[in-house]
Image (cartoon, helix red, strand yellow):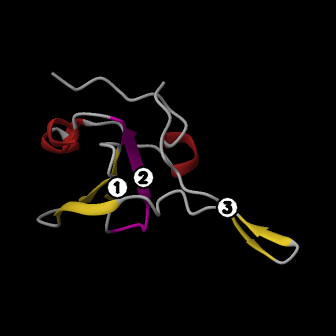
Amino acid sequence: MAKRNIGKATKYGDWVAPADPLSCYQPANRDETGSPCYYGYIDAFGSWCIMQDDGINGITKFAFGTKDYTDYWDAKADLTYEYFNVAINADQQELPE
């Protein structure tokens, strides 16, 4: 699995704040035309995150990858989304056919 650029921790005196694992991503696309809504983010190295917000129950899930963002964005409705802690550690899924 390719490593994702997830930022660095910040030290405040004796306390170390964990890095925001989404801080390296910039907004790329959004689709709010229905439910769920989708938000796409990409970093400078081509890694990406697509966030799925169900808009009803307040449930937000994610899919991550390291290449081919536009192909995955086009297939966003057919991807498998997981809670953040699972999705960020998963291998990139295959594109749905």
Quadrant in which the C terminus appears? top left
Q: Earlier in the sequence, mark 1 or mark 3?
A: 3
Q: Is residue 47 above or below residue 42?
A: above
The residue under label 3 is which amino acid type?
Ala
How many marks the image carries: the answer is: 3
Q: Residue at x 15, y 42 (%)?
A: 70
Q: Is residue 1 above or below residue 21?
A: above
- In the rendered image, which quarter is residue 59 located in? bottom left
Q: Which mark is residue 61?
A: 2
Point out residue 52 in the picture as x, y percentages from the top left corner: 33, 55
Q: Earlier in the sequence, mark 3 or mark 2?
A: 3
Closer to the eye: label 1 or 3: 3
Q: Which mark is residue 51?
A: 1
Taking the image as shown, residue 69 lies to the left or right of residue 19, namely: left
Magenta stretch, residue numbers: 56-66
**Label 1: few (<14), some or many (≥20) within 10 Å?**
many
- In the rendered image, which quarter is residue 77 located in? top left
Whole-number angstrom distance, CA of label 1 to CA of label 2:
6 Å
Whole-number angstrom distance, CA of label 3 to CA of label 2:
24 Å
Would you name the residue on which mark 3 appears?
A: 9
Taking the image as shown, residue 3 lies to the left or right of residue 73, namely: right
Point out residue 74 in the picture as x, y percentages from the top left corner: 12, 42
The residue under label 1 is which amino acid type?
Met
Point out residue 87 in the picture as x, y percentages from the top left corner: 49, 41
Taking the image as shown, residue 15 lies to the left or right of residue 57, namely: right
User: Tags 1 and 2 in contact by the CB under 8 Å rule?
Assistant: yes
Taking the image as shown, residue 81 lies to the left or right of residue 77, namely: right
**Label 3: few (<14), some or many (≥20) within 10 Å?**
few
Point out residue 28 in the picture as x, y percentages from the top left corner: 21, 60
